[in-house]
Amino acid sequence: MTSEEKDWLRLHLTRGLGRTGILRLMQAFGSVREILTASPKAWAERAGIRTAVAAELPGENAPMLEAAGRDLEKIQAGIVSLWDERYPCLLRTIHDPPVLLYVRGRIPRGETLAVVGARQASHAARRLTAEICTELAGRDITIVSGLARGIDSAAHQGALRGGGFTVGVLGCGIDRVYPSENERLFEQAAERGAVISEYPPGTPPLSGHFPGRNRIISGMSRGVLVVEAAEGSGSLITVDFALEQGREVFAVPGPVYAPTSAGVNRLLKDGAHVATEARDILEVLWPQIPLREVRRREDSFAAALPDAARDIYLHLGDEPLHVDELVRKSGLTPMDVSAILLHLELRGGVEQLPGMRFVRRRGP
């Protein structure tokens, strides 16, 4: 940890100071070092900070400061301030940007898209999310999401599969992995982009932190894609922030009677862009980026298969199909169908799901 990062950490851990207080101090003194060397009386006179708050500034060797510093060093995390050139350019333009970001990895430069949606998402929604994000990441568009279950995880995984960058924004301290089962995804995101938080190390994932996290997700991005969201979900809070910030909103339409479709279908009624593939987003935000013809790759893949394998492959689509149904549709024996499915899976043409169900992979 650099001396400047330690200074910022010390200031950020000052109880009762907050974002507004730090902004006022920076406006008055110009640098974090000048703030820390100023007296409580100067804080009050020049920045309007009460002396009782100034008295809460941790000492240079305070145990809480040392513990937080060790936590950051353990995970090789740094601190990026609002006045740092590494700070995300788009995020700096919103009306309430975080004054500090704790960062694991390196925040990518370039174009960005936020992706949010249901935690208990359907397989089809997770699959579509991953495919769209793979396509966009392959065009150097960074995918920003919240590292939660469901759509968030699919978005990050799709970006990684596309060889691109991804950023995970947390509603807890940078040293916390939440949810715990996403530990490997956290590490991958830090390796191929960044994991960031505005909260100091040790901060638990309290529900009140997530709306603030959502404003960062949308604030970092040119647009927001919503895939499955019920009415009142956190994803719609992100959309509210996006609209306030002047971002474009995209939504994937869903079945009318599905609870997780209510939110996205309302967004579409209210004027959100329909998105069912990467092309829909590219044409609005980045029309200069060339499109990839995924369907042409699928047709080429199918054309190279033997007749029986092609028949099985073309029976499959986005909705999972049980192996018994494939036997019925194809008229082949269960042994033949199983052998063909294994062959297609090894070639990347199909994906097996729990319960002996299969779906086609797009663009193998």
Image (spheres, rainbow, N blue to C red):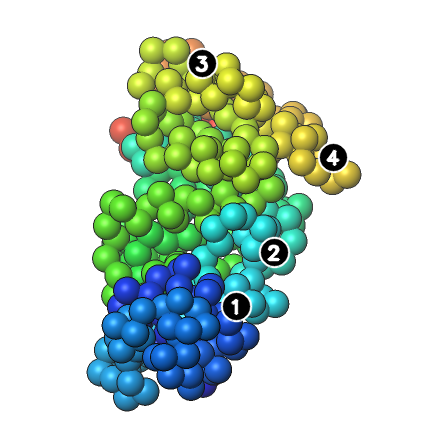
Identify residue type, mark 1: Gln
Q: In this view, does 141 lie above or below 41?
A: above
Residue depicted at x 34% and y 23%: 231
Q: What element carries label 3?
A: helix
Compare residues 100 and 287 and report the one nearer the observer. Answer: 100
- Residue 169 in view of the camera: yes
Quarter of the figure with the C terminus: top right
Q: Which amino acid is tagged 4?
A: Pro
| Label located before the other in sequence (4 or 3) | 4
Q: Which mark is residue 330?
A: 3
Q: Which amino acid does label 2 sit on?
A: Cys
Number of marks present in the image shown: 4
Q: How far apart are marks 4 and 2 (CA)?
A: 21 Å
Query: Distance of mark 4 from mark 3, alpha carbons?
Result: 42 Å
Of pointers 3 and 1, the one earlier in the residue sequence: 1
Q: Earlier in the sequence, mark 1 or mark 2?
A: 1
Disc 1 target residue: 27
Which residue position is annotated with label 4? 287
Kindly report the distance in space between the C-alpha atoms of the residues bearing marks 3 and 1: 72 Å
Q: Nearer the viewer, residue 265 or 342?
A: 265
| Secondary-structure class at tag 1 | helix
Q: Which residue is the site of mark 2? A: 89
Question: How busy is the neighbourhood of tag 2: few (under 14 within 10 Å), some, or many (20 plus)?
Answer: some
